[in-house]
Each structure stands twice: as structure tokens, then as C-alpha cells.
Amino acid sequence: MTKRYSFSLKKLTVSIIIFLFGVLCFAAENTNWIVAAEQFESTQNKTDSISNALVVDIPGRILEKLDNALYREIPSDESYERETYKLKNDRLSLFLQLSNAIKKRDALVLENYNERELKTKIADEEKKIQEIKDKIDENIEQQKEIKDKLFSQGSADNSKKEVYKEENAGKLRKTFDEYKTFFKNVFEDEEEHIIEKITPYSGGSGGSGLYSRSTALQDADYGSKVFSDEMLSKKINALMYGQITTYGDYVFVTASLRVYPGANVIATVSEAGAIDELDLIADSIAQGFIPAVTNSLPISLYVSITPPEAAKKAIVYIDEVIYQNTGELITLDSGVHFVQIVSENYRTAGTTYFFNGNKKYLVEVELEPSVQGEIYLAHQKELEGVFYQNGMAVPKTDDGKSIIAINGDVVLGQFVAENGEAAFFYIPENMITNLSTLEINAKPFDRNDYIEKYRRKMYNSYSILIISLIPHFVAKGQYKARENTTEGAGAWNIASKATTAVAIGCGTWFVYNLVRYFMAADSVIPAEPKKKNEKNKKKSKEAEE
């Protein structure tokens, strides 16, 4: 295996590990928490084109703002509402079954059974009735247990909030371990929560993406059972609705959010602004909704950087906001954050992580020194052209070598010949050494035409192979049909062998062109340099002298 493919395999392996980590963290327990919005109402009952557009456009924009890698920590009362709603529906169904079973038992006396048969039938029905009663009693007990659990969990949550206010990180446990150039440790407390990804509703009709009421629900109240049933049947966890008032070029918007089941209003936000600044209005309302939607307390983040030399000059970027590395706790909203550490003369480290609310995190980062300097790159063959790095032509030494700046990371550049044809080159990390000299054989040519040429040849050879099989099957079939007769068997045998040879030849030609096509497609891989062999160069000079 070449170093190039070995490096690619390592990167692929790391990507798979990170992906599997994310799956293990969220896939088992995370589902989508669907937020829908219906068309807002106009308080002035306007029917002009602007008002008609606003009542649809504004809720749609707010939903788009909420679709930003947000997660909701399901509170205990919401879980209670979900479980209670399911138990209630099951209980209603059981009562209907009980009613039918009792009616069926009572109707047995009207049937033409003898005394013995009647007692047997009634006993069977009584057994079924008792089974239904047992299920009803079990359902009621389950609801009592859920209620008791809610009460005890509520008390525990209140105690937890008091502890959170203290400046004590508490007991921490290790949950994450990545490359040493990335986050080394992430610690959080041991509390587990139900986490669901906040996702906008996608079942809207009419192209707006908004929820639209059915005819039967036009006058239904948001808190009614029939409306709650509609929300749950469409798997909608929260519904946003609101009112819009316009005054000339300005608009006033009030939006509310209800959670189902329960139909509890968790947030109401108002905002005013110019009609031509609707995006700002929608963003302000969405930001007002986020604390209630995510239902998570802030998190505290402490960043520990080693070595000490790197920590002195380190800057912490969180979602592109700069935090000086002062050793203080950083308070953030819960959710997904991109954290990056930058320090002079050290390689940058960073990653994206979901920080669950009401927790304290310790992030340990070990920065690696970056290799600063330059390497000298020369073409193996006498070929006039220019090497480019980061889109800029690189300078040359007096003896014609190109100077490539290095900072410890891999180098990806391009060599452009005088005729305008180009070739990419790639210098792996293990070959980057300050003041080293490398030779490369970058072959500039039009790779698109090259690949297209062999692609056409491959398809043409495949078509000829398919066509060659037609006479082969015909000749083979005719020979098999006449094999036990004397009429024409010999001629068809010769034809069968001839067409078989032709088909094999066409197949061989197709395989050859297929391999050539794969080789042509492989030509887009950037060329890698080799360390310059000074001994061979010295010998060649001595031979010339």
C-alpha cells in the first residue's frame, strides 16, 4: 500500500470513528421534535397582496431560523403529558371493549342454550370481562406511578438547579476521546436526559410548508381534544401561531408556541419593524423562542490548553466569537457549538460538539507545534512552468527551484505549464521538513479530454461485445439443435467456434479498455514528490565531466 492510500485510509478510518461516535451518542435516544406553524392572522382583516404575503412569509421565515442544529431537552412534565395521553387513549379503548363484552354477555340469555351451555358461555365471557378490567386497573396504576415519578423528579430538578448555581464542577466523567490534535477530553455530569432534534414541519400543503387545518377543524380551539388529536396524528410536537398588524411600511408581529399533548403555551414573543426588514423580525422572534424550545439551562465550559507556551498566546473561538484564554469558565447556551483553539506557532485544533444544558464541561486540548519554514520543489523533467500554492505563484531560487511555504499542514498546489495545461500536486505531512528539497513529476495535460477519450473507447468496446454475443448465441443454438443430426451440424459447429472466438476477443478488448479508463480516471489524483537523490545527481555530474 502506498503512502498516499495509507494516509487516505487513516483519514477515512478517523471519519468513520467520529461518525459512529455521533451515532452512539444520539441515534439510540434522539428523535425529531417537530415544530409546525400555521398561517398567521391579520388583526385588521386586510386582504391586499402585501398582507396576504406577510401572514405566510413571516411564520415560514421563523421556522427556517429554528432549523439550526437545535436540540430539545424534554422536561418531565412534557414526558408526563405524552405518557398520560397514551394511557388515556388506551383506557378509553378498554372501556369500549368492556362495554361490548358486557353487552355480549347479557345477550346470551336471549339465545337458545340449555342451562349447562349457558353457564359455560357466560363463564367464558366473564373471563374476557375480567381480563379487560385487569388491563384497566393496570392502566390506572401506571398513570399513578407516572404522576408520582413526576413529583419526585420535579423535586430533584429544583435541587439540581440550586447546585448548578454553585461554583463547583461536581463529579465529572469522561465521554469523548479524539485525536491528540483535537479535543482530548470532554467531561460532563452523570445525568441522562431525553434529547430530541428540533425539526421544522415538512408536511405542509400549497407550497408554503405551513400546517393547514382541515375543514372539520376550522373553528376548533387550540386546547381542544380534537385539535390535540390532529397534532399528534401528524406527529407535530409544537405549533406556532400568531397575529400581524400593519401600519403603513411597518408591521407588528405577536407569535405564540403551544406544545402537544397538553396544549401548553411555552412562549409568546412580540416584535415590530419595517416590512422590508422581515428577516430581522423573524430572527428576533426565533431567538426569543429558542430558550423555551431547547428547554436547557446554559452550560459552563472550561478550556485547558497544553503546553503552557501555547496556552499563553492561545485564543479560543466559539462559533466565531473570540474568547481570550484567561482560565475562566465560559457560559454558553446549550446546543451544538464549534470550538476552535488558535495559538501562534502551533497547529490549530477544533471540533463541533453537542453541549447538553445544565452541565459543566472540561475540555483539554494538546496543541502540536507547527513546522514553519519552506521547502524547495523542482520538476524531475525539464519542463517550463510555474508552481502555484493557495492560488498564488510561488517564488523561485536562483537555480530554478520553487519555494513552497510550509506550516506543518499538508500542501496541495498546482503546476501550470507554459501552454496552459495544469496538474495538481500534493505534499504529505511526513515529507514536510524545513529546507528540504523535493522532486516531482507532475504531468500537465487536459485530464477531462483524456478521461472522456477512454470513456468513449470503453463504451464502444462494451457495445461491440454485446453485439458479438448475438451471432454467438444464434450459432451455438443452431449447432445444439442439429448436434444429433447430419444436416448442417458441421457448418454450425464451425460458426459456433468462430463466433465464440470473436466474442472472447471482444470481451478481452472491453476489459482492456475498462482498465485503461480506470487508469485515466486515476490521473486526477495529485502527484506526490520524492526526496531528491543527491548521490545520483552527483554521479551523473561526474559522468558528464
Image (cartoon, grey):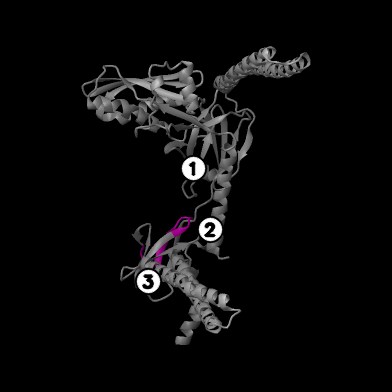
Find out whether the residues at labels 3 and 2 contact each other: C-beta distance under 8 Å: no
The residue beneath circle 3 is 400
Q: Position of residue 28 (x, y in %)?
A: 60, 36
Seen in the image, is 344 located left or right of residue 154? left
Q: Which mark is residue 341?
A: 1
Q: CA distance from mark 1 to mark 3?
A: 38 Å
What x and y, as percent, mark residue 63?
39, 30
Quick one: SS at disc 3?
loop
Does the segment drawn in magenta span residue 76?
Answer: no
Residue at x-position 42% and y-position 28%: 36
What residue is shown at x 39% (from left), y 63% (from top)? 414
Q: Nearer the viewer, mark 3 or mark 2?
A: 2
What amino acid is at disc 3? Gly
Residue 405 lies within the magenta run: yes
**Looking at numbered disc 2 in the image, what kind of residue is underneath it?**
Ser
Q: Is residue 13 left or right of residue 374?
A: right
Along the viewing direction, whichever of 423 and 94 lies nearer the viewer: 94
Nearer-the-camera pick, 18 or 510: 510
Label 3 packing within 10 angstroms: few (<14), some (14-19), many (20+): few
Gap in angstroms between the C-alphas marked 3 and 2: 32 Å
Q: Which residue is mark 2?
A: 8
Graded by Cα atoms within 10 Å as few (under 14), some (14 to 19) or many (20 or more), the crowding at tag 1 reads: many
Q: CA distance from mark 1 to mark 2?
A: 25 Å
Q: Is residue 508 above or below residue 80?
A: below
**Percent from the top left, x then y, of residue 301?**
53, 33
